[in-house]
Image (tube, rainbow, N blue to C red):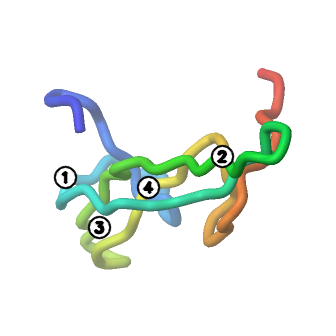
């Protein structure tokens, strides 16, 4: 987690204080016959309304174990 980075509640969309990071794992498309895991320390936020939640990541849908295609901006 980068100091000074604003974290946002994934349900409410408002800025919240950071809580701690949690390790998350996803499986990306295999490269030839090799599995390609993605392992990241994803920050959590302490939302006053929703409690402790893991922030959303751009490469996977919420509660997914697999990566997805990034949407063009």
Separation (CA) of disc 3 from disc 2: 33 Å
User: Which residue corresponds to mark 2?
Assistant: 36
Separation (CA) of disc 2 from disc 1: 32 Å
User: Which residue corresponds to mark 3?
Assistant: 47
The front one of 69 and 12 is 69
User: Which residue corresponds to mark 4?
Assistant: 55
- Tell me residue 28's x, y (percent): 71, 48
Residue 14, placed above or below residue 31: below
Q: Earlier in the sequence, mark 1 or mark 3?
A: 1
Q: Earlier in the sequence, mark 2 or mark 4?
A: 2
Q: Residue at x 67, y 56 (%)?
A: 27
Locate the N terminus by quadrant.
Answer: top left
Alpha-carbon neighbours of circle 2 within 10 Å: few (<14), some, or many (≥20)?
few
Alpha-carbon neighbours of circle 3 within 10 Å: few (<14), some, or many (≥20)?
many
- Tell me residue 37's x, y (percent): 59, 51
Q: Earlier in the sequence, mark 3 or mark 4?
A: 3
Q: Is residue 34 left or right of residue 39?
A: right
Location of residue 62 (image quadrant) = bottom right
Q: Nearer the viewer, mark 2 or mark 4?
A: 2
Secondary element at tag 2: strand
């Amino acid at each position: 987690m980068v100091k000074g980075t604003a974290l946002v509640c994934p349900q409410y969309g408002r800025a919240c204080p950071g809580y701690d990071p949690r390790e998350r794992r996803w499986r990306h498309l295999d490269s030839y016959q090799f599995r390609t895991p993605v392992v990241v320390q994803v920050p959590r936020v302490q939302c006053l309304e929703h409690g402790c939640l893991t922030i959303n990541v751009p490469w996977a849908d919420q509660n997914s174990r697999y990566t997805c295609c990034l949407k063009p901006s």
